[in-house]
Image: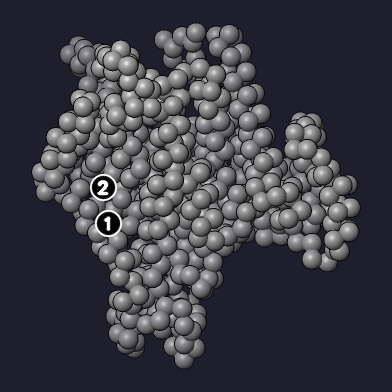
Amino acid sequence: MAPGATRLAGRRRLVLRQITRSPVGLAGMTIMWVVVVTAALAPAIVLHDPTKPNLAARFQPPGWTEGSSWTYPLGTDQLGRDILSRLIMGSRVSVIVGVASVAISSMTGVTLGLVSGYYPGRWDQLLMRITDAFLAIPFLVLVVAIAGVVGPGLLTIILILGFTGWVTYSRVIRGEVLALREQEYITAARALGQRDPVILFKHVLPNVTASVIVIATLQVATSILAESSLSFLGLGVQPPTVTWGAMLADGRQHMGGAWWLATFPGLAITVTVLGIVFLGDWLRDVLDPRLRE
Amino acid sequence: MSRYIASRLVQMTIVIFVVSVMVFLMVRLRGDMLSVMPLHELSSEQIEQLRRAWGLDRPLYEQYIVFLTRALRGDFGESRRYNRAAMELVMQRLPWTYLLAGASAVIALVVAIPLGVLSAVRRNSVIDLIGTGFATLGAAVPNFWIGIMLILLFSVTLRALPAFGAESWQTLIMPATTLGLGMAARLARMTRSAMLEVIGQDYIRTARAKGLANQSVIYRHALRNALIPVVTAFALQLGWLLGGAVVVEQVFAWPGLGRLMVEAIGFRDITIVQAGVFWFALTFILINLAVDILYTVLDPRIRYA
């Protein structure tokens, strides 16, 4: 077994022990659990139908304001739909997009990073130039343009974010693999006649896992922010599916009279992303202090 | 140094070339350009005619060569909606985006550098807590939401600032603050950690040991050295800033390139989208090139092979 694998098992114990000691890590973990459980149980825990208009109850202010009731704790929107129920439902898109897009980009990026770091040469050079080009186009510009051309939809957004987000992984992993391949145990594995794919996945991969986990965590945050931007622009997931970004777009339309429409979805995004950032920062400190800026 | 600049120029040319391939392929992700355009009013024969007229029946590489040779001359084709060259429209909006990005960058620097330095110098103090709190929160908040909240506070409630448009200098304040604060958060974090690293160095201890005033040690010895990674981060964050402009321009109805692009997407005006992406990328590439060259001036120790 590669030395990295045992080290990882040790780290796992360390992680469990340390989470209880770090307030930031604990806060991040708690927020993430709340969001994920909310998303999973969403249809069961909503107070009202999040998509059904109720014109009699348009623009109800939040429950604590004067002259309002607690029927709609966070108020209602321009069609009389309950904001809290919509927030609960909207968490689903954020969670799905965050997780699925990062799954795609981490698998793509790690594979490409492993291969190009292990076989430096012409393909490696080509891949690095493609990476440069991806990094040269401001991320949101690229995503907005592709979403605009390809068209909106949940699956499209996941694919777009997945296939534009792999660059960070391939960059970092390639760098690490370049250093790793000179290690003696890799030479030893090669001398023992192990085939390259086996070396890559059994000996090299375990040693880059820490970096992958840290990058992936922070990228979930980037994906969620990008999805909300796209939905805000009307290029993301379309109604009747509820998204926090689209709720913000509604809120912007009705800023003059109903502050609660725009306030709460933004808070939901912020708290969720903050939870992921906390978790990511803490994971980085525990798993790999070298990744600190 | 000239050799370094020459090699950077070659590298840049390759990147621009790959970007052009991406911009070319991007609009063909769903078949050819015609399939993403609203052409309901045309018959299938007319569409076929259009396809031949635009050369879309030719092999992909031939189409790319045509695209590239035209793009090199600054010709990205006609905008279908405005009946004008896409490039001309982009050039009209570009100064607005540069103005917004420039003002935001200034705000970011003015906020982030002092905050980052103070956080590092007074480590674990109240100001450090505020500084790191701002940095963490600022990176998590969606910038368009900040924009909406600013409008709610300053336009709707206080009636102090105009919410939309670009008629007077006051209209620049809120969009620039929105983008500037987001960037400041990212930059303050970098400044803090760069300063902490430098403060731990031997030459800082020496400077202190020979009895220099604290101010002088911090600003003449530490900050100068910490600025190099900060400048790198600043240049890279400009990419975030330009991307953010696309959304923030929409919030404030700012007449920049981002807004033009989003409008063009609404009309399926593909040529503008292509020209827009290309110019966003080119701006970002040129800024990073300028920063790389600036290093050789900033830091004589850096020798490039």
Residue B146, compared with residue B13, is above or below; it is below
Identify the residue at the far bottom of this view. A56
- Which quarter of the figure is the N terminus of chain B placed in? top right
Q: Residue at x 51, y 26 (%)?
A: A128
Residue B224, compared with residue B276, is above or below; it is above
Q: Residues within 10 Å of mark 2 (few under 14, many from 20)?
A: many
Q: Residues within 10 Å of mark 1 (few under 14, many from 20)?
A: many
Q: Residue at x 77, y 41 (%)?
A: B76
Subunit under mark 2? A
| Amino acid at circle 1 | Met
Image-based side of A4 in relation to A98, left or right: left
Residue A23: % across, % down: 16, 49
The answer to whether marks 2 and 1 mark residues whose Cβ atoms lie closer than 8 Å is: yes
| Residue closest to the eye, B188 or A71 | A71
Q: Residue at x 52, y 34 (%)?
A: A135
User: Judging from the image, what secondary structure is the residue with disc 2 in?
Assistant: helix
Which residue does the numbered mark 1 point to in the structure image? A32
Image-based side of B302 in relation to B204, left or right: right
